[in-house]
Amino acid sequence: MNVVETRNLTFGYTATPVVEDVNLTVEAGEFLGIVGPNGSGKSTLLKLLLGLLEPDSGEARLFGEHATAFDDGERIGYVAQSVTTDTSEMPITVREAVLMGRYPHVGFGRITEDDRRKAREALETVGMSHLADRRVARLSGGQRQRTYIARALAAEAELLVLDEPTVGVDAESVAAFFELLADLHEFGLTVLLIEHDVGTVVERASTVLCMNREVLFHGSPDDFVESTALAEAYGATPKIMGVSE
């Protein structure tokens, strides 16, 4: 079963569509990188895929179900752009935040030692065990980003969705983050990533989607580099860092 499917997906906040006639399939184990200029509809597309918005026409499906009716939330880990830049006080520790990923499995029961073990393993996977007792509000952007990924891992999510997760994060932490993401994808996690750094997407993703309201390209990174999609999307051809001429 495909993880994500859309058919003629269209949505607008006004009469003008922000996302128009998008047809997309994401298979289990795929790493889809989504690129496009500011205001091109990338974040809106993610919200439609997650069922957070109702399309004006067409449909989006998650794991075979209509996205707006999908209620198996522990299968999805969502890291929003605001995660790395939010400075509001969050009076819980890293361990507590990650343990929240186990709540959908607990139901009306109590957190068990097995739940705590899975949270510890998730923290170890993202390299945050040494900060387990630190308040989330006291973390850097990169550390906060890893905490929310750990929460998704603790929940045993099958799909990880990230909306420009490196905004406000220092270069060293960005590099470490993408190494982590590569490891998780290699382990079998399906990844949907919006990222402003086109070169990083070309280097890391298994599939690239380039859009500016509508889909301009959907295919392999190599074919994307050879296409005219960047020029169509941005109005010029930006240099793709890390890609040989």
Image (tube, rainbow, N blue to C red):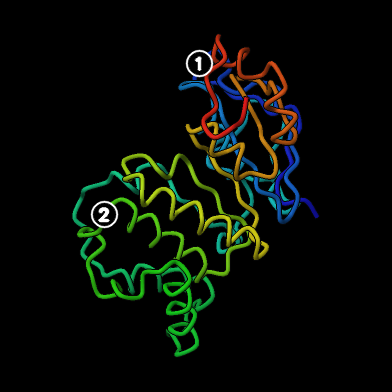
Q: Residue at position x 38%, y 54% from top?
A: 145
| Pointer 2 local density, CA inside 10 Å: few below 14, some 14–19, many at least 20 | some
Q: Which quadrant would residue 212 be assigned to in this image?
A: top right
Q: Whole-percent x and y of residue 16?
A: 56, 12
Q: Which quadrant would residue 48 be assigned to in this image?
A: top right
Q: Which residue is mark 1?
A: 14
Q: Is residue 68 left or right of residue 78?
A: right
The N terminus is located in which quarter?
Answer: bottom right
Q: Is residue 131 left or right of residue 207?
A: left
| Pointer 1 local density, CA inside 10 Å: few below 14, some 14–19, many at least 20 | few
Q: Whole-percent x and y of residue 206?
A: 69, 45
Q: Is residue 125 above or below residue 224?
A: below
Give the secondary structure at mark 2: loop
Give the secondary structure at mark 1: loop
For marks 1 and 2 on the same chain, the one whose residue lies earlier in the sequence? 1
The C terminus is located in which quarter?
Answer: top right
Q: Whole-percent x and y of residue 169?
A: 33, 45
Q: Which residue is mark 2?
A: 140
Q: Residue at position x 42%, y 79% from top?
A: 120
Please, what is the three-letter code of the amino acid marked with disc 2? Ser
